[in-house]
Each structure stands twice: as structure tokens, then as C-alpha cells.
């Protein structure tokens, strides 16, 4: 086995002696790693970049649920483990770094569980949380619309109060996993007009499928269709579908976005590629330039991890670190793309989907996913304006 060189070996030894920043019970990390190695060795999954968004594998999600690694912060009375959100981060880091196929349950676990716990009625908690915790209930996010992406307050989807329920009309777009989800949380206008902006918006938990809801696939550049256009044709909802308080939709959606934007998936989507490249260099030998690139990428990842953990700790303590979360997502999603570009330039393999070389295939896959990194969950321009405004105050 070729050496990576004195400098890198020393850095690796230093990093190992310091160990990862302890988050919670780090024994959990060892258990998750052992499970993932066993699953990958048994061919239960092939590590891929961005598999938290496109790796839909219900059986794998259910296996994680069986081990108590989904919905970990959900209270025991609703089927969860009653642990801290920081325990969830330990598991999330390992799943992401190993490129595990977790898309089926990811949105439900990451943001719908905290949202339901914060704003849901007791009936909604009983109805959805046990399925989320077992990794068998999937959710989609119904925020963006054709004319309301960055400018989310401009949503036009309207929910009319019919007395015994609600009637939903409008169009959502880029709705990840809506074709596979059991429910989606929809941001809609219940009162006033789009010019009222933040006032008059409400959230709804909408069960799928629904006879009044049409879900059309949107293909991405790799030909896959993991997101959709969702059209509400006067879709009928039960009265109990309202999530939280009528008119508080904007406030609720902002706290949901804090969970959406702050997780480790905002800098770890392409970590499987870095790991695969490091293994390749270790096996085949590395040039000085490749060692430097590997060291620089590793150092950036390490710094981002420390920043991301601080955001997780703040959120877990019940605070709203919006500015720090926006900064980590901006830097993190830029890093995810830079990692792909730099490895592509530095490695001697050409990226090719379906190539017999798993590294070349993983690289090609990562290249095709890169354009989405700085768009989803809020674009980098919008995140930078949040940071800019936050630094002014
Ligand atoms: C892979 C993927 C998955 C997604 N999944 C979901 C999902 O599940 N649910 C959901 O609701 N949405 C989802 N989205 C949508 C995502 O949230 C939006 O794409 C994003 O918020 C940007 O909105 P937009 O596409 O309408 O672009 P626009 O808002 O039209 O922006 C276009 C460009 O203009 C820039 N811009 C806009 N306003 C400003 C400004 N004020 N200052 C500076 N620059 C500005 C933007 O930064 C961007 O570069 C997903 C997107 C992607 C790529």
C-alpha cells in the first residue's frame, strides 16, 4: 500500500489522536459505522454522493428505524427514542459520510418531526410521529412555487375555509419525493392577498395521495425524477389538516427552515467521493499535488464540521442561530461543489456513469448533482443577504 506522504500521515495521526469532537455518546458512532460497513459489504447499498436526496430505499430506512436511528429526538410516547437532536447528528454524519440511501425518511426525520412536535395537535403527533420514527412514513416539503422560490412570502396557493374543512388551489414546484411521500406540509395563503406577504399564511399537513392533487415528475440532468410539480385542483382537506395556528405559517415555516438548512447534509453530500478518492490514492499512490488537494479539502471539511456542530448545539438548546446556519450552508454547499471540481481536475480518471470503475461512476454522478447544491434549501445569494443583514444588526 503506497504511503500518502509524511505530511499527510502526520496530519492524519494528529486528527486521530484528537478524535472527532464529542457530540453526545460517541459509542453510538461506532455502532452506526459497523452497521454501515456490514450493509455495504453485503451489497445492501452502493455508496453514492447526495444519497440523502436521491437514494430512496424503503427497506434501508425501515432497518434504520428498527435500530432506533430515525426520529431519535421524538419522545418515547410518540414512538421515538427521546434522545437529544445531537444524538441524531452523530447518526446523520455517519450516514452521509458513507453515502447511505436515506432519502425515503430524511425530510420527515430532519424537519417534519421537529415541526410536528413544535406546532402539531396531539392527534397529528399520534398520527404521524410513530411512522416517522420507524422510518416508514415519508414527507415532502410544499414551499416553493413557480413564482415564489427565493421570495417565499409571495406564495399564491390558497386554502379556502369551507366550514367543515379546507379547499386547496395552486401549484407547488421542485417538491422532492412528493410522488413517494405519505404526506406533504404545504404553505398556503388562508387570508389576505399575496401583497400582504408574511401575514395570512398558514401550514397544512396534506395526506397523499388525494383525488384533487396531481403530481407530475420533473426530470433532472441525470434523467432521474426525484422532484415534482404538484397541482392542487380544489383539493379537499379535513379541518384537522391545519398545522399550528391559522396565520402563523410564516413564523412556523422559518423555524422549519432552520432545521432544513442547518444539518450536516449541507457540507457532507459529496464526502463519499472524498473518502473514495483518499482510498484510491492510498492504494495507487499520490502525487504531491494530489496530496495537497486532499489535505486542503480535508481541512475545509474539518472546519465546516466544527461550524456545523456549533449550529446544531444552538438549535438543540432551543435557540435560533439563523445567521450562523445561513453562513454554514453557504460555505458548506460551496465546498460540496468545489470538492467535486477539484477531485475531477486532480484525479486521472474521467467521470463516466455506468463505467466499470466505481470511482469514475461516483465522480460522474457527483458532477451531475452539483448544480443543485447551492440552490436547494435557499440559494447562496439569499443566504448571503441573511448573513449580511445579520452582521449589520
Ligand atoms: C434539488 C432541489 C430540490 C428542491 N426541493 C424542494 C422541495 O422539496 N420543496 C420545495 O418547496 N422547494 C424545493 N426546492 C426549491 C428551492 O428551494 C428553490 O429552487 C430555491 O429556493 C430558489 O428558488 P427558485 O428556484 O424559484 O429561484 P429564484 O428565486 O427565481 O432565483 C433565481 C436566481 O435569482 C437569485 N435571486 C433571487 N432573488 C434574489 C435577491 N433578492 N437577491 C439576490 N439574488 C436573488 C437566486 O439566488 C437565483 O440565483 C428544491 C430545489 C432543488 C434544486
Image: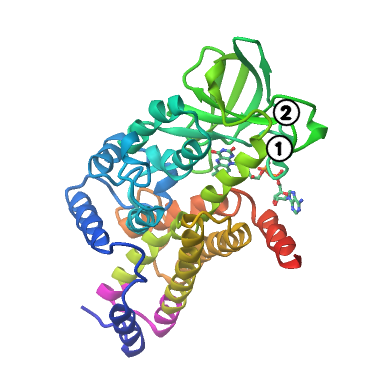
Ligand 1 is found in the corner quadrant, namely top right
Q: Earlier in the sequence, mark 2 or mark 1?
A: 1
Q: Residue at x 26, y 83 (%)?
A: 3
Q: Is residue 178 above or below residue 6?
A: above
Color style of the picture: rainbow
Does the numbered disc 1 mark a residue whose Cβ is under 8 Å from ligand 1? yes
369 horizontally vs 202: left or right:
left
Q: Is 118 included in the stretch rendered in magenta?
A: no
Identify the secondary structure beneath mark 2. Answer: loop
Q: Is residue 91 above or below residue 131?
A: below
At label 1, counting other C-alpha atoms closer than 10 Å, the crowd grade (few under 14, some 14-19, many 20 or more) is some
Does the numbered disc 2 mark a residue whose Cβ is under 8 Å from ligand 1? no
* Quadrant where the N terminus is found in the figure: bottom left
76 horizontally vs 34: left or right:
right
Residue ID for mark 2 = 156
Nearer-the-camera pick, 76 or 26 = 76
At label 2, counting other C-alpha atoms closer than 10 Å, the crowd grade (few under 14, some 14-19, many 20 or more) is many
Q: Which residues are magenta?
A: 281-294
Q: Residue at x 33, y 38 (%)?
A: 133
Residue ID for mark 1 = 148
Amino acid at each position: 500500500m503506497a504511503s500518502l506522504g509524511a505530511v499527510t500521515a502526520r496530519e492524519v495521526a494528529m486528527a486521530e489522536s484528537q478524535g472527532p469532537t464529542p457530540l453526545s455518546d460517541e459509542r453510538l458512532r461506532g455502532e452506526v459505522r459497523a452497521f454501515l460497513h456490514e450493509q455495504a459489504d453485503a451489497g445492501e447499498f452502493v455508496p453514492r454522493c447526495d444519497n440523502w436526496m436521491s437514494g430512496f430505499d424503503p427497506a434501508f430506512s425501515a432497518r434504520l428505524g428498527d435500530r432506533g436511528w430515525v426520529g431519535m429526538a421524538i419522545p418515547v410516547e410518540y414512538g421515538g427514542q427521546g434522545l437529544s437532536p445531537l444524538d441524531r447528528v452523530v447518526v446523520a454524519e455517519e450516514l452521509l459520510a458513507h453515502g447511505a440511501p436515506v432519502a425515503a425518511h430524511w425530510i420527515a426525520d430532519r424537519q417534519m418531526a421537529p415541526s410536528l412536535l413544535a406546532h402539531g395537535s396531539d392527534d397529528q403527533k399520534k398520527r404521524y410521529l410513530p411512522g416517522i420514527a420507524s422510518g416508514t412514513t415519508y414527507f415532502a416539503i410544499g414551499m416553493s412555487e413557480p413564482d415564489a422560490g427565493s421570495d417565499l412570502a409571495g406564495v399564491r396557493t390558497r386554502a379556502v375555509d369551507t366550514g367543515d374543512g379546507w379547499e386547496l388551489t395552486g401549484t407547488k414546484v421542485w417538491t422532492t419525493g412528493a410522488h413517494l411521500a405519505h404526506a406533504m406540509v404545504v404553505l398556503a395563503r388562508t387570508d389576505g392577498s399575496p401583497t400582504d406577504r408574511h401575514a395570512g399564511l398558514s401550514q397544512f399537513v396534506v395526506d397523499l395521495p388525494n383525488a384533487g392533487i396531481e403530481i407530475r415528475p420533473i426530470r433532472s440532468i441525470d434523467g432521474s425524477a426525484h422532484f415534482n410539480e404538484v397541482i392542487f385542483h380544489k383539493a379537499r382537506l379535513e379541518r384537522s389538516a391545519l398545522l399550528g395556528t391559522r396565520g402563523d405559517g410564516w413564523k412556523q415555516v422559518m423555524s422549519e427552515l432552520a432545521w432544513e438548512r442547518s444539518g450536516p447534509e449541507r457540507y457532507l453530500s459529496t464526502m463519499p467521493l472524498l473518502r473514495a478518492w483518499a482510498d484510491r490514492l492510498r492504494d495507487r499512490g499520490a502525487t504531491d499535488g494530489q496530496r495537497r488537494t486532499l489535505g486542503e479539502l480535508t481541512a475545509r471539511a474539518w472546519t465546516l464540521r466544527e461550524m456545523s456542530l456549533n449550529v446544531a448545539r444552538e438549535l438543540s438548546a432551543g435557540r435560533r442561530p439563523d445567521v450562523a446556519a445561513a453562513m454554514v450552508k453557504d460555505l458548506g454547499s460551496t465546498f460540496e461543489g468545489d470538492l467535486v471540481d477539484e477531485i475531477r481536475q486532480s484525479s486521472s480518471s474521467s467521470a463516466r456513469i455506468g463505467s466499470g470503475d466505481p470511482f469514475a461512476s461516483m465522480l460522474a454522478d457527483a458532477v451531475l448533482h452539483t448544480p443543485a447544491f447551492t440552490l436547494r434549501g435557499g440559494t447562496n445569494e439569499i443566504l448571503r443577504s441573511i448573513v449580511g443583514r445579520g452582521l449589520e444588526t
